């Protein structure tokens, strides 16, 4: 044997099962809390408010956050890039574009679910274009480049829609919706968002072993018997469902998909598959907590309008990402 | 033109694996130039003994033939008229100048080129040039990735692999917090952990210090002698000449020579355009080969 005397453990990581149990408890506590806390009030609600306002809001925060969290964990693993998140692939952008188009034509006035349906359609078209851009046998790099192109395209078309907006009222509506939030949603929105998000999460959760193999590069993963192109396609399609479904009802909520895996790695280690179930729960907990902050903010800050959730996640997420970036080792 | 592939064919000597499937038996290399005579029965088992019928298959001794009239990469012919037979129990070094097609040959053998049918990943392990891990897994986790083709998390093959590569004590260390040479050995351990019949390693000793490079080559030779086919792309000609059983010299995409290692020096010299002879200067020598690896 080759001599080696440098032995010491780096890995004092939490077993995944314990992390999942702890995070599940956290999500449950936050769900109950968010049913109790209203916009700027701590009073117990009556049944109508509970069922019509708080329950959809809490459920949506958990669903959307979970979808975003696992999308970020899968994309970072599949693309071997710690900066990947659903926004990077342009899925959030095309979902926003789809919703903006619905706004633009005024379809939502006559048929309320038209807005999330437009967002879902946008996410689906985005995913199809992404996979077409990425080519017959996509590699991680081609997927990133296709995503950046798609993001730019969606942003340009969105700007066009905004500049052509028929009246200032519509412009304000689109802008506010794009900032993202889960307030003023109904159980109809939950029913629209839940199927694609849950389906997407199930697709993404099954990719664990493939992502582990991909951390050694696409060639090695292929030599280990992992169908690389299929794994990448499933990652893109699952993200379109899980994150696109969320963006369709909650607008553009940034940084959750990016931050969640970084929060979990110190706890669970860096193996991509170890992060997946925990990232669903951590994403849900993070967005529930952020939405609680949004509701409590009027108690502290003099705000005339509720703080948009997407603005809050960005305000908290950006400095957090800078802190992570400073701690990351130079390769 | 599509390369033609032949799977297992012909027969070679029986296996020399340890009962229970140890990767590297702690003996059998005291005379490095001699191919070992057959000894022991075909006892090799995939995975942990007794873990299931699939993992207890007796491995037949087999030669692996690879012929390809032409392999194109990016529309450019990189390899021509390749005919190669890989024998279990043999360490084959592939040498040649930069751009001769060594890496392409290895990827073709691994079934990774378009037009080459994929190999059974349980039987073939491939270590690419400059292999690295995108995430800071622990050494043990990296080695355990080699069990993905078997869809098990058998601990014993991983431990054996880490032991062979001399990094068992580093099992719980993160690969970004150990030296480059240790990280490279972790990647090698990943290939070992698959316990395949054919190991394809692209420059496994590229940035290792001389002692570690020799130790790795010795481990590879022992692995070959325990009944596997091992193919190594090796730029360090001294190491190839000293440890390989056979050397294939690639030059401009063709096999210029395919010789027992002891006869390969003239062909190597001609491929690199260098003279050869006896070096009178003092130089580093390998460890005493009669040392039993501990």
Image (tube, coloured by chain):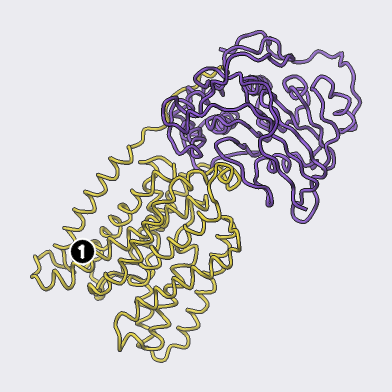
Q: On the rendered structure, is A33 left or right of B201? A: left
Among all residues in the image, which is located at the extreme front?
A: B10
At x 56%, y 60%, the residue is A143
State which chain is coloured yellow.
A
| Residue B214 place in picture, x, y as percent | 67, 20
At x 33%, y 72%, the residue is A249
State which chain is coloured purple.
B
Helix, strand or loop under label 1: helix
At x 46%, y 63%, the residue is A237
Q: On the rendered structure, is A140 left or right of B11? A: left
Q: Quadrant of the C terminus of chain A?
A: top right
Q: Is residue A124 above or below residue A224?
A: below
Q: Nearer the viewer, residue B124 or A17?
A: B124
Q: Nearer the viewer, residue A93 or B120?
A: B120
Instruction: Please give the chain letter of the residue carrying mark 1.
Output: A
Q: Is residue A302 above or below residue A168?
A: above
Quarter of the rendering containing residue B217: top right
Q: Is residue B41 above or below residue A297?
A: above
Q: Nearer the viewer, residue A160 or A22?
A: A22
| Residue A264 place in picture, x, y as percent | 37, 46
Quarter of the rendering containing residue B156: top left
Query: Mark 1 highlights which residue?
Result: A296
Mark 1 crowdedness (10 Å alpha carbons): few <14, some 14-19, many ≥20: some
Quarter of the rendering containing residue A102: bottom left
Q: Nearer the viewer, residue A136 or A157?
A: A136
Q: On the rendered structure, is A198 left or right of B267? A: left
| Residue B209 place in picture, x, y as percent | 66, 24
| Residue B264 place in picture, x, y as percent | 84, 24
Query: What is the tally of numbered marks visible in this picture?
Result: 1
């Amino acid at each position: 044997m080759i001599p080696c005397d440098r032995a010491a453990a780096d890995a004092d990581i939490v077993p995944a099962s314990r992390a999942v149990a702890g995070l599940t408890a956290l999500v449950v506590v936050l769900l109950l809390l968010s049913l109790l806390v209203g916009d700027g009030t701590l009073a117990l609600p009556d049944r109508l408010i509970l069922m019509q306002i708080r329950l959809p809001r809490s459920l949506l925060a958990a669903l959307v956050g979970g979808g975003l969290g696992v999308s970020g964990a899968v994309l970072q693993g599949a693309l071997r890039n710690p900066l990947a998140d659903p926004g990077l692939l342009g899925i959030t952008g095309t979902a926003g574009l789809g919703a903006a188009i619905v706004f633009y034509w005024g379809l939502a006035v006559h048929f309320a679910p038209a807005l999330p349906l437009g967002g879902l359609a946008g996410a689906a078209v985005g995913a199809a274009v992404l996979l077409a851009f990425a080519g017959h046998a996509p590699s991680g790099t081609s997927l990133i480049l296709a995503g950046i192109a798609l993001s730019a395209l969606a942003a340009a078309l969105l700007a066009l829609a905004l500049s052509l907006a028929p009246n200032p009222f519509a412009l304000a509506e689109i802008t506010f919706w794009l900032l993202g939030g889960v307030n003023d949603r109904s159980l109809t929105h939950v029913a629209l968002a839940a199927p694609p998000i849950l389906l997407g999460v199930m697709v993404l959760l099954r990719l664990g072993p493939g992502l582990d193999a991909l951390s050694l590069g696409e060639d090695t993963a292929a030599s280990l018997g992992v169908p690389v192109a299929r794994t990448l396609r499933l990652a893109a399609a699952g993200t379109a469902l899980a994150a696109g479904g969320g963006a369709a009802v909650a607008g553009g909520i940034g940084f959750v998909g990016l931050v969640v895996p970084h929060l979990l790695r110190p706890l669970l280690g860096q193996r991509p598959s170890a992060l997946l179930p925990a990232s669903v729960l951590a994403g849900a907990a993070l967005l529930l907590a952020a939405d609680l902050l949004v509701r409590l903010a009027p108690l502290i800050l003099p705000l005339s309008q509720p703080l948009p959730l997407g603005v809050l996640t960005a305000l908290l997420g950006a400095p957090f990402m800078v802190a992570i970036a400073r701690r990351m080792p130079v390769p | 033109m599509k390369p033609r592939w032949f799977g297992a064919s012909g027969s070679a000597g029986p296996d020399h694996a340890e009962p229970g499937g140890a990767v590297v038996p702690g003996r059998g290399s005291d005379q490095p130039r001699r191919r070992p005579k057959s000894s022991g029965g075909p006892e090799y088992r995939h995975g942990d003994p007794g873990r299931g019928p699939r993992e207890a298959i007796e491995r037949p001794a087999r030669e692996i033939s690879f012929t390809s009239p032409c392999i194109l990469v990016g529309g450019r012919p990189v390899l021509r008229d390749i005919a190669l037979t890989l024998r279990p129990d043999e360490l084959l070094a592939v040498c040649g100048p930069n751009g001769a097609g060594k890496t392409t040959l290895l990827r073709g053998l691994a079934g990774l080129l378009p037009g080459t049918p994929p190999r059974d990943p349980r039987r073939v392990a491939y270590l690419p040039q400059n292999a690295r891990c995108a995430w800071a897994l622990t050494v043990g986790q990296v080695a355990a990735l080699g069990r993905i083709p078997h869809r098990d998390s058998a601990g014993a093959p991983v431990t054996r692999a880490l032991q062979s590569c001399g990094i068992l004590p580093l099992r719980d260390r993160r690969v970004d917090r150990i030296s480059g040479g240790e990280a490279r050995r972790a990647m090698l351990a990943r290939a070992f952990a698959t316990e395949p019949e054919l190991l394809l390693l692209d420059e496994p000793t590229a940035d290792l210090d001389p002692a570690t490079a020799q130790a790795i080559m010795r481990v590879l030779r022992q692995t070959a002698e325990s009944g596997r086919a091992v193919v190594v792309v090796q730029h360090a000609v001294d190491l190839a000449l000293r440890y390989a059983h056979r050397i294939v010299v690639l030059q401009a995409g063709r096999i210029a020579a395919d010789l027992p290692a002891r006869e390969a020096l003239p062909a190597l010299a001609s491929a690199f355009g260098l003279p050869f002879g006896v070096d009178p200067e003092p130089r580093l020598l390998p460890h005493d080969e009669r040392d039993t690896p501990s």
